Image (cartoon, rainbow, N blue to C red):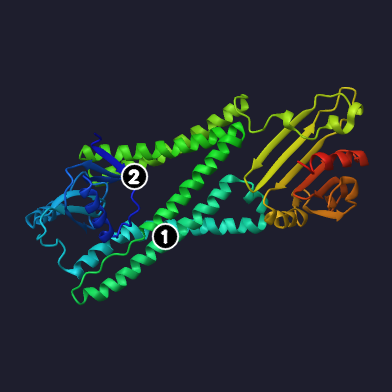
Amino acid sequence: MKQTKRRMETLSFYDRTGIERHLEKMAAKGWMIDRVDTFGWHYRRIEPQTLRFAVTYFPKASDFDPGPTAGQQVYHAMSEQAGWRYAASWAQMQFFYTNRPDAVPIETDPELELETIHAAMKKGLLLPYGILLAIGLWWSAMLVHDLWSDPIGLFSSVTNLFLMVVWPLLSLLCIVEIVAYLRWRHHAKQAAACGEFVDTPSTRLFQQVVFTVCGAAFALSMLYNVTTGSPLLRVVSILMVLYMLVLMAVVQGVKQLLKRKKVSRGVNRAVTLAVDVVLAFGMMAAIVFGTLRATQNGLLDRYSKPETLPLTLAALWGDELPKADYTPRWTEDSSPLVAVYDGSEWAYPTEEGIPVPSLDYTVTVIKLPALYERCRAQLVDKKIEISYRQIDVVTYRIATPCDAAPWGANEAWQVGWQDTGLNDSYLLCYDRNIVEIMFSWTPTDDQKAMVGATLGAL
């Protein structure tokens, strides 16, 4: 029979009422809290019994302490004299239990308890949640900016879609936790003046919803990247998950090892932080360097196989295509909402000096019709600026409407630059595809029709 178990609990750090009730239910099922760490709450098996739990806070305690401090030991001894046995701790939080229904509560002064909790919450809740909220709001603002400036880049990336779900939810979670705590503290201060205790509010269900949605979004994004991404994207996605797991495991392991060795709080914190920083940068450098070398050596490829190129120079030119060593390139960035495909084909001029054609195109496939107009507006109204620093000249992209019929498109524009005029570049809008294509020659009507038949229906 399994003697231990680990669970991820969604209980607020200040929710002493909810934690006490939860631990009482676990004890009734035969599980006693043993410790809390990065990877969850650890329980050991006991005989199922009815126990009372008390959660108190010791603001001067730290998760880096090798054991209970002298002050905590005195506190634990006084609690044991009152009939309460120490079970475990989680940073400033202390867990006690008793089987005596008549045991006097550990905390008897509501005002003193309130100040003790607040002193612990400033380090355990307000500071970390405040930092996380600032980061979350910054990321959310960046995503909103991308929503208007680059919707195609935003919606064609599974990672961006994941961040669109996670950061607003985490920001909302921080706001809910901070507001719930401050509201409770306001009411508890009023009740404490009358000598009364106030139960803490529970946000457990809300936290469960947030973490479930974030976890599902992460799993789906990983599954999509691994199953549909390029070889490079698949490897990098797997390596990043391993990176996070290994980093957390090593850092937690170092901290626990130093605690068992009875190393002081300051030394433990300094060594753990140093290991965290060095390992994080070292592993990230190894991932970047390793993937770059693997890509350079041909072991990994950020490009899909060239034979997937839907439109080729050979198809457009037929037997008239000059002989040369043409290089095809095809990349895909896709999500369930939008896909962006980049194709190109070029060659170096032959020894005889015969010019060879080149082709470059981008196909944006809008899978969700509601996004079509926003993506269309981005490409049609796109303002690209190129600055030539050497001669202090700035030129802008221009697009002029042209006949869409030869392309079989709904709308068509010929694209060029303000200083050089229009060239053989075109922007074509189809029912759900938007094609940007650039030729090194002026295409014929037959070639335009072939573009519509292939890229317009991709």
Q: Which residue type carries mark 2?
A: Thr
Q: Residues within 10 Å of mark 1 (few under 14, many from 20)?
A: many
Q: CA distance from mark 1 to mark 2?
A: 19 Å
Q: SS at mark 1?
A: helix
Question: Is residue 11 shown to the viewer in this render?
Answer: yes
Q: Residue at x 92, y 39 (%)?
A: 446
Question: Is residue 444 shown to the viewer in this render?
Answer: no
Q: Position of residue 401 (x, y in %)?
A: 87, 55
Q: In the image shown, does 356 or 431 lie closer to the viewer?
A: 431
Q: Which residue type carries mark 1?
A: Cys
Q: Position of residue 308 (x, y in %)?
A: 73, 31
Q: Position of residue 111 (x, y in %)?
A: 20, 70
Circles 1 and 2: CB distance less than 8 Å? no
Q: Residue at x 26, y 61 (%)?
A: 17
Q: In the rendered image, which residue does mark 1 sit on?
A: 174
> Residue 38: which disc?
2
Which quarter of the image is occupied by the C terminus? top right
Q: In the image shown, does 75 or 41 lie closer to the viewer?
A: 41
